């Protein structure tokens, strides 16, 4: 190719007339170690359309970007190809450089030769040849690209926060304090989430209720927060800035406007049932009740499956004693439509089910407890009023074994570390010493993960209190005694890996530190809100390190343990971060949307509706009258699913047209074309 | 359903009762077991430690014979044989089952080993392609192929009132191969089967612990201590019988029970039966057809309890009474499985 530097192309050149600049990045040694970048650049310069090709140490640096800007202006480049890292990383950077030099940012194409090539192999020859193919593909595609203009939409300043645990609560309060309205929806009868069940929090041992309940009350009283408990989000439509959300309010059978929260109905209700939810099966609640006395809101809820009136048509005790006539057995569920600009999901986690590890005897051996059962036990407002006792309810244990990593760091269940349990186990050891001073406490651990501010110091404190630490995974918990010393105890058998011996420790009580799991319905929730889940069901963030609270769907943010196991401090940090992101967006009043969208050519559409169902964003509507589907541009996220699915080829994805994609494939396969001889 | 049947040495001698009851029960459930012709020893537990290569070849010969004998005959020549499920080979003995399935898996994962074994088999005109058989344990076939429902439907005389300690031993669920039919740490299929037959299953924490195997011949001290633990555990839970699925376990617990009593001054009197014997009884088959009476510790006194419903009702009454007004005890965790019963 000749390098004719003086020729400036007309505004709408045909592909043959496009002037392409190719920039190959070394990425320090990340790319250059495996790919002969100079070779790739020299080769690229020989390719059709290419006016200039360069290699540079760091293309993303300001000097690298200036190189592109200067070439665009000096050499009249009309298309830019950068062969570097993933577009997730720096597409935005180089689009900015194009724009500054006066080139439409969508006339830029990125070839990912780092993640896809240099990091994937040590074979320099193969990597270099693949990089060339990628560059060729990018060139062939770039010349067919069309200038696109971003879409601007207004942002509704209201925000929906789903989940009133500590993460959601923090997000809601921060936004409300910034002057924006928040709808806080929780499927439970009270906000507070898992943290409301806890007694003390590590490492400072301050009381969970003392730091949580003021926030709950603030949320309930805040003029900018509309609290919707006992409610669930059923459907979400719309797009960033303009979501329309349907919320179902489940019937409480208590008229909130009349109820004073006096609690007489709870006291008089004759039906006492096991509380599997808030008390995790360790305590009881009435058929009309609230989670705990400080619940917010204070209104109780009738549990219809256990209410004598709902089951047998008799009783009405609560109705009779209610001083304000707030009981209404005829209440029905209601639906409400909310208009919001952004949604923060803070739906939390679930406990790992200890019954899945049968060799630890949970459910079979009376004095095996889960960590959440123990949390309720040590809670002053819990079933034992804070006393540490065995299942008989009266005997204090003289020895307690705490087993770490139950369901976590175990390929049979969950491979990941649940993060918060080591510290909770240390807290439990301390609390046992505090409540039963003579008791021996044994921690069976794999590693103690005390990575956090003042965590290691707390570990040392617990060590000095005389807790025993045995490093080794527990094989089993059994009541099969081998000798008189074990009779009547639970025996924990484990290999002590520090001394290389099998040990059997008889104890009175065992606490299983169960891990965190994604909520059982996390996948359904993800599909309702149009975001992704990973293999384990945790919600997927846009970038694990650099963008942890934003999802791939614009306007849908995540905070807290729904994204992965987290303790209170990280959940709070994410709640604040999500709120700050939303506030920043609302402050701009309008939002710029990527113009990478699908559109349907009405004349070619057969009305088969296949695309309606493949669209994960509910962005395609069907016009029944004319039997034609249409993409709502603002809703479309440009994923391309409909483009591939359309049997009539009636759908085109802007920036990913059929011609662009096919020429890119042709480019990628350049050395496979007949007549091309590769001299490796 | 058709199965190749590999009885193994034990079922011809000491575990004859296992063989008889297996055949009787299979007949009731419509399972057809055809014995492998000219089979040999599986290598048991020790030959693999003595000469590994020969042990692989020894077991490989059984696999080759079975694969040849039960090779599927394509109904239509058009359908390639590979499409069909491989023929199934069932072994009632845990050691046979483990060796057969282990060798099949190891040969599949190591072409070099398979080549060596086939060189040895070639001397006898045999050849085995790993994966051309699916090796199953008898318990797996009973509960998963025949199924709990079909078994429940055949029960004529429920084992009501009989307290059973389900003993799996160490081989049947270990190692935890992919696709293993039960939990390697705390198996429950036999528990459920016994419940389906109407028996009261007691918790038996040592259910997957070792019975001592051949240690009775090598180190009696070790073996008797292991047996004592098992017997004590079953006795502590007031089991009437120990039910097992492995000839080695049955032999050790039954034959050496007197030796344990002599050594430790204990007084255990726990009959040890095969699960197929209890299935047969529940199906209403005559005890003679099931080999009952061949055991050392007589099972008749314990089996006489079947049908004595008094205990069950008493237990239920105790359960109800447990909720006293001043009872401060904390509730036990909810167990969905118990709810089913």
Image: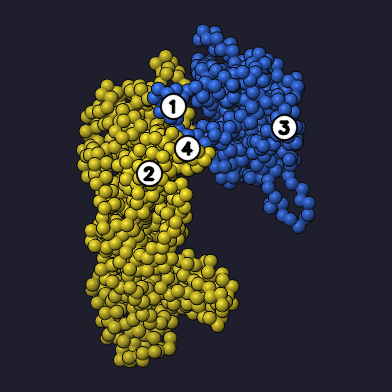
Residue wearing tag 3: B154
x and y percentages locating residue A566 in the rendered image: 33, 47
**In the displayed structure image, the side of residue B238 where residue A564 appears, left or right:** left
x and y percentages locating residue A659 in the rendered image: 49, 79
Image colour for chain A is yellow
N-terminal-most mark, 4 or 2: 2
**In the displayed structure image, the side of residue B84 where residue A589 appears, left or right:** left
N-terminal-most mark, 1 or 2: 2
What element does badge 4 sit on? Answer: loop
Q: Which mark is residue A300?
A: 2
Residues at marks 3 and 4, CA–CA distance in whole angstroms: 46 Å
Where residue A82 sits, quadrant-wise, is bottom left
- Looking at the picture, does residue A165 appear above or below residue A267? below
Disc 4 + disc 2, Cβ < 8 Å: no
Q: Nearer the viewer, residue A74 or B164?
A: B164
Residues at marks 2 and 3, CA–CA distance in whole angstroms: 51 Å
Image colour for chain B is blue
- Looking at the picture, does residue B127 appear above or below residue A613? above
Q: Which one is closest to the eye, mark 1 or mark 2?
A: 2
Q: Nearer the viewer, residue A219 or A101?
A: A219
Where residue A627 sits, quadrant-wise, is bottom right
Q: Nearer the viewer, residue B30 or B136?
A: B30
């Amino acid at each position: 190719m000749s390098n004719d530097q003086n020729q400036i192309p007309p505004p709408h050149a045909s592909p043959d007339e496009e002037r392409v600049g190719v920039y190959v990045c070394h990425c320090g040694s990340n790319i250059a170690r495996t790919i002969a970048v100079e070779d790739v650049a020299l080769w690229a310069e020989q390719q059709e359309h290419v006016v200039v090709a360069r290699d540079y140490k760091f293309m993303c640096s300001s000097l690298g970007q200036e190189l592109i800007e200067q070439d665009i202006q000096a050499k009249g480049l009309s298309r830019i190809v950068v062969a570097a890292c993933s577009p997730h990383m720096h597409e935005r950077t180089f689009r900015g450089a194009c724009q500054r030099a006066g080139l439409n940012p969508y006339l830029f194409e990125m070839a990912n030769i780092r993640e896809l090539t240099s990091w994937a192999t040590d074979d320099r020859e193969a990597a270099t040849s693949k990089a060339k193919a990628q560059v060729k593909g990018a060139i062939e595609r770039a010349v067919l690209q069309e200038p696109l203009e971003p879409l601007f939409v207004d942002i509704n300043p209201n925000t929906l926060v789903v989940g009133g645990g500590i993460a959601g609560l923090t997000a809601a309060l921060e936004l409300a304090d910034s002057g924006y309205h928040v709808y806080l929806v929780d499927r439970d009868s009270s906000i507070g989430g898992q943290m409301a069940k806890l007694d003390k929090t590590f490492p400072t041992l301050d009381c969970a209720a003392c730091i949580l309940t003021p926030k709950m009350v603030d949320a309930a009283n805040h003029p900018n927060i509309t609290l919707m408990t006992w409610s669930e989000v059923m459907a979400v439509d719309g797009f960033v800035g303009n979501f329309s959300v349907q919320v179902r309010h489940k019937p409480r059978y208590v008229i909130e406007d009349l109820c004073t929260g006096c609690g007489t109905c709870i006291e008089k209700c004759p039906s006492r049932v096991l509380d599997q939810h808030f008390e995790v099966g360790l305590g009881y609640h009435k058929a009309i009740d609230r989670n705990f006395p400080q619940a917010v809101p204070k209104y109780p809820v009738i549990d219809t499956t256990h209410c004598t009136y709902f089951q047998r048509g008799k009783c009405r005790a609560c109705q009779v004693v209610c001083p304000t006539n707030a009981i209404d057995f005829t209440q029905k569920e209601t639906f409400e439509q909310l208009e919001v600009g952004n949604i923060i999901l803070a739906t939390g986690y679930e406990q790992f089910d200890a019954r899945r590890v049968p060799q630890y005897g949970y459910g079979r051996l009376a004095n095996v407890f889960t960590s959440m059962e123990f949390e309720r036990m040590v809670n002053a407002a819990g079933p034992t009023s804070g006393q540490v006792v065995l299942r008989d309810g009266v005997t204090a244990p003289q020895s307690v074994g705490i087993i770490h990593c139950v369901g976590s760091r175990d390929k049979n269940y969950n491979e990941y570390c649940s993060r918060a349990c080591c510290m909770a186990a240390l807290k439990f050891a301390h609390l046992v010493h505090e409540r039963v001073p003579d008791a021996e406490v044994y921690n069976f651990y794999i590693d103690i993960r005390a990575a956090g501010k003042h965590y290691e110091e707390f570990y040392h404190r617990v060590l000095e209190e005389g807790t025993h630490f045995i490093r080794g995974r527990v094989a089993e918990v059994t009541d099969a005694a081998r000798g008189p010393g074990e009779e009547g105890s639970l025996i924990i058998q484990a290999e002590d890996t520090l001394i290389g011996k099998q040990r059997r420790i008889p104890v009175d009580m065992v606490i299983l530190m169960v891990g965190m799991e994604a909520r059982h319905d996390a996948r359904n929730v993800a599909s309702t809100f149009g975001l992704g889940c990973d293999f384990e069901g945790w919600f997927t963030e846009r970038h694990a390190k650099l963008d942890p609270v934003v999802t791939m769907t614009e306007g849908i943010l995540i905070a807290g343990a729904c994204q992965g196991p987290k303790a209170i401090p990280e959940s709070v940090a994410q709640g604040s971060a999500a709120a700050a992101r939303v506030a920043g967006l609302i402050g701009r009043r309008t939002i710029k949307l990527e113009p990478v969208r699908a559109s349907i050519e009405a004349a070619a559409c057969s009305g088969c509706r296949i695309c309606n169902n493949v669209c994960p964003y509910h962005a395609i509507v069907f016009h029944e009258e004319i039997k034609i589907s249409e993409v709502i541009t603002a809703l479309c996220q440009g994923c391309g699913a409909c483009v591939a699915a359309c049997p009539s080829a009636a759908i085109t994805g802007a920036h990913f047209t059929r011609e662009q994609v096919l020429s890119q494939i042709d480019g990628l396969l350049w050395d496979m074309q007949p007549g091309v001889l590769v001299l490796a | 359903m058709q199965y190749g049947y590999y009885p193994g040495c034990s079922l011809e001698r000491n575990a004859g009762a296992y063989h008889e009851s297996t055949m009787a029960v299979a007949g009731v459930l419509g399972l057809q077991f055809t014995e492998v012709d000219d089979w040999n020893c599986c290598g048991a537990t020790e030959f693999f430690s003595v000469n590994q290569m020969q042990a692989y070849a020894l077991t490989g010969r059984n696999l080759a014979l079975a694969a040849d004998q039960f090779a599927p005959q394509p109904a239509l020549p058009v359908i390639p044989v590979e499409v069909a499920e491989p023929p199934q080979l069932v072994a009632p003995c845990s050691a046979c089952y483990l060796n057969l399935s282990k060798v099949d898996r190891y040969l599949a994962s190591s072409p070099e080993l398979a080549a060596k074994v086939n060189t040895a088999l070639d001397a006898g005109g045999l050849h085995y392609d790993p994966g051309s058989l699916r090796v199953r344990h008898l318990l797996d076939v009973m509960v998963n192929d025949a199924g709990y429902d079909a078994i429940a439907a055949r029960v004529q005389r429920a084992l009501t009132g009989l307290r059973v300690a389900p003993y799996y031993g160490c081989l049947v669920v270990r190692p935890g191969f992919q696709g293993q039919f039960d939990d390697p740490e705390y198996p429950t299929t036999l528990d459920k089967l016994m419940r389906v037959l109407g028996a009261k299953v007691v918790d038996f924490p040592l259910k997957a612990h070792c019975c001592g195997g051949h240690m009775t011949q090598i180190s009696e001290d070790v073996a008797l201590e292991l047996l004592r633990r098992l017997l004590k555990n079953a006795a502590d839970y007031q089991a009437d019988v120990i039910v097992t699925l492995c000839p080695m376990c049955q032999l050790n617990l039954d034959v050496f029970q007197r030796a344990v009593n002599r050594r430790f001054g204990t007084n255990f009197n726990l009959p040890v039966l095969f699960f197929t014997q209890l299935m047969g009884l529940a199906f209403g088959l005559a005890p003679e057809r099931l080999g009952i009476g061949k055991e050392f510790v007589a099972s008749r006194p314990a089996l006489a309890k079947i049908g004595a419903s008094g205990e069950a009702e008493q237990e239920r009454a105790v359960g109800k009474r447990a909720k006293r007004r001043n009872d401060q005890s904390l509730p036990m965790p909810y167990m969905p499985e118990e709810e089913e019963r």
